[in-house]
Image: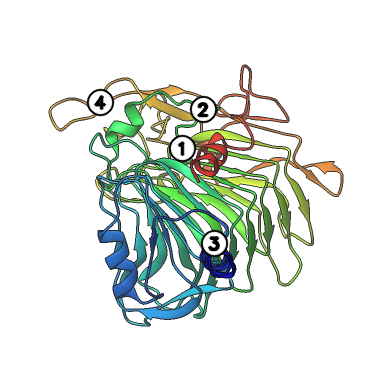
C-alpha cells in the first residue's frame, strides 16, 4: 500500500507544478512565446503565427535595427509583458517603424517603446479593426516623433479604421495618413460619416510634451476621432492642401482636457482643412490664443499645381471672384464625383464645421480665423460658433473594439 500512495502523491505534485509554472508565464492565454525581446526572436514568432494567434513577448529590453512586420493575411495579437517590462528601443539611424502592422488589422499591446530616430516611428498601423493599447512611447531626441502612424495603403484606397487607447505618449504623437497616394481622391468621394466608426479613434490616452509639437495631425484624406484624452503642453492639428495633395478629410474632437503648464503655447486647436466637430473640451493654463484656430494655406500661399485660391485655379469652386470655395477648405466635404485625370475637378458639398461647449476656465471659447483667411472661411456658412451640429451623435464609447479584442483573449 505505501508504494501506490507515494506514486499517486508524486504524480499529483508533478501536475500541480506544471500548472503553477504555466500560470506564472503570463496572466492570460497565449499561443506562441517569443524566445526573447530581440528583433530576430519576435519576428520568428510572428512568422510562425496563424490567424487569431496571441504572441507573448517576455519581459526584457532590446534595441532593434529592423522592422517587425505582420503579414496582411493574418490578424494576431502581439503582447508584451507590460509597458515597463517589455521595452523596445530604436537604433538611432535605423529608418522605418519598430512594428509594421500593415493591413492585417492586428493588435499591439502591453509594450514600451523608446524612439531615437527622427526618420522612424514606433508602430505603423493599418487595415480595419487594428488596436494599439496600453503601450508607452518615449522620445529621446529634440524633434517630435510619431509614436503611432496610421498609414493608408488599403486595396480600395479607403482610410484605415481602428483604435489607439490607454496609451502614454511622451513627446510623441499620432499621425493619420488617409491614403498612401497624396491625392486621396477615393476618400474625398466617400460620404462624410461623422459619428460612425470609419476613422481611427484615439481615446483615453495621455500626451505629455516638453518639446514643441502637436499630439495629433492628419493629411491626404486622413480622418480621426480624438476623444477623452489628456494633453499636456501640446496642441491638436489637421492639415490643409499644402501642394499637390488633398487635405485632412474629417475630425471629431471631444471630451478632452488640454492643459498648458510648462511653457508658452499659442492655440490648443489648429484646424486647416476638411470639416468636423469640436465640443465638450476643457482648456487650462495661459494660452496665447485660447481659441479654435482655423485657416487655409492656399488663401495666402501659392502652392503646387493648385496655386493660390484667387479665382483662376480649376482646383477650386470659383463661385466667387476670390475662388471660393477653396479645394478641401474648412467646411467643405464630399466630392460630387471621383476626381480622375480624365474629368473636370469635382465640386464639393458644403458641410460646415460646428463647435460648442468648449470652455476655458468656465467661459466658452470661440473660433478664430487666422492668416486673413476670412476671405474664404466665413462664420454661419463654413463654420458655426457655439452651435451643435444638427443630427450629429458621437460614436459608441468605449469603442466596441475594446470588448471585441478583450473577449478574443
Residue that label 2 marks: 196
Marks 3 and 2: CB-CB under 8 Å? Answer: no
Furthest-front residue in view?
Answer: 1
Q: Nearer the viewer, mark 1 or mark 4?
A: 1
Q: Secondary structure at mark 2?
A: loop
Q: Secondary structure at mark 1?
A: loop
Relative to 23, does residue 241 appear above or below in the rendering?
A: above
Q: Nearer the viewer, mark 3 or mark 4?
A: 3
Q: Which mark is residue 19?
A: 3
Give the CA separation, mark 1 to mark 2: 8 Å
Q: Earlier in the sequence, mark 3 or mark 4?
A: 3
Label 1 crowding class (10 Å Cα cut-off): few <14, some 14-19, many 20+? Answer: many
Report the front residue among 199 and 327.
199
Residue that label 4 marks: 338
Q: Quadrant of the N terminus?
A: bottom right
Q: Secondary structure at mark 3?
A: helix
Give the CA separation, mark 3 to mark 4: 59 Å
Residue that label 1 marks: 199
Amino acid at each position: 500500500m505505501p508504494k501506490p500512495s507515494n506514486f499517486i502523491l508524486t504524480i499529483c505534485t508533478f501536475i500541480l507544478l506544471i500548472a503553477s509554472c504555466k500560470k506564472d508565464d503570463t496572466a492570460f492565454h497565449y499561443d506562441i512565446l517569443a524566445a526573447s525581446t530581440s528583433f530576430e526572436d519576435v519576428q520568428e514568432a510572428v512568422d510562425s503565427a496563424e490567424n487569431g494567434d496571441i504572441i507573448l513577448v517576455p519581459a526584457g529590453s532590446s534595441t532593434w535595427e529592423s522592422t517587425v512586420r505582420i503579414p496582411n493575411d493574418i490578424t494576431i495579437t502581439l503582447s508584451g509583458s507590460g509597458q515597463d517590462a517589455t521595452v523596445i528601443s530604436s537604433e538611432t539611424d535605423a529608418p522605418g517603424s519598430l512594428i509594421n502592422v500593415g493591413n492585417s488589422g492586428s493588435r499591439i499591446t502591453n509594450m514600451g517603446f523608446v524612439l531615437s530616430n527622427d526618420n522612424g516611428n514606433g508602430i505603423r498601423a493599418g487595415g480595419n479593426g487594428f488596436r494599439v493599447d496600453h503601450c508607452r512611447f518615449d522620445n529621446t531626441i529634440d524633434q517630435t516623433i510619431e509614436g503611432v502612424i496610421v498609414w493608408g495603403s488599403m486595396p480600395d484606397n479607403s482610410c484605415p479604421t481602428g483604435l489607439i487607447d490607454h496609451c502614454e505618449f511622451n513627446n510623441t504623437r499620432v499621425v493619420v495618413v488617409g491614403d498612401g497616394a497624396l491625392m486621396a481622391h477615393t476618400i474625398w468621394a466617400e460620404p462624410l460619416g461623422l459619428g460612425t466608426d470609419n476613422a481611427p479613434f484615439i481615446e483615453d490616452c495621455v500626451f505629455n510634451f516638453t518639446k514643441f509639437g502637436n499630439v495629433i495631425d492628419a493629411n491626404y484624406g486622413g480622418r480621426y476621432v480624438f476623444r477623452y484624452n489628456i494633453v499636456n503642453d501640446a496642441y491638436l492639428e489637421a492639415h490643409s492642401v499644402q501642394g499637390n495633395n488633398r487635405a485632412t478629410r474629417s475630425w471629431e474632437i471631444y471630451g478632452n482636457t488640454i492643459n498648458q503648464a510648462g511653457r508658452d503655447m499659442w492655440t490648443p486647436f489648429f484646424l486647416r482643412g476638411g470639416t468636423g466637430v469640436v465640443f465638450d473640451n476643457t482648456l487650462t493654463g495661459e494660452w496665447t490664443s485660447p481659441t479654435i484656430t482655423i485657416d487655409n494655406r492656399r488663401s495666402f500661399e501659392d502652392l503646387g499645381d493648385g496655386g493660390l485660391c484667387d479665382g483662376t485655379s480649376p482646383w477650386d469652386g470659383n463661385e466667387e471672384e476670390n475662388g471660393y470655395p477653396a479645394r478641401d477648405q474648412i467646411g467643405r466635404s464630399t466630392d460630387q464625383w471621383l476626381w480622375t485625370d480624365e474629368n473636370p475637378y469635382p465640386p464639393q458639398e458644403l458641410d460646415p464645421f460646428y463647435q460648442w461647449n468648449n470652455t476655458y476656465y468656465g467661459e466658452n471659447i470661440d473660433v478664430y480665423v487666422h492668416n486673413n483667411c476670412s476671405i474664404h472661411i466665413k462664420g454661419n456658412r463654413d463654420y458655426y460658433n457655439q452651435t451643435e451640429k444638427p443630427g450629429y451623435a458621437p460614436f459608441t464609447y468605449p469603442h466596441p473594439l475594446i470588448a471585441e479584442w478583450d473577449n478574443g483573449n
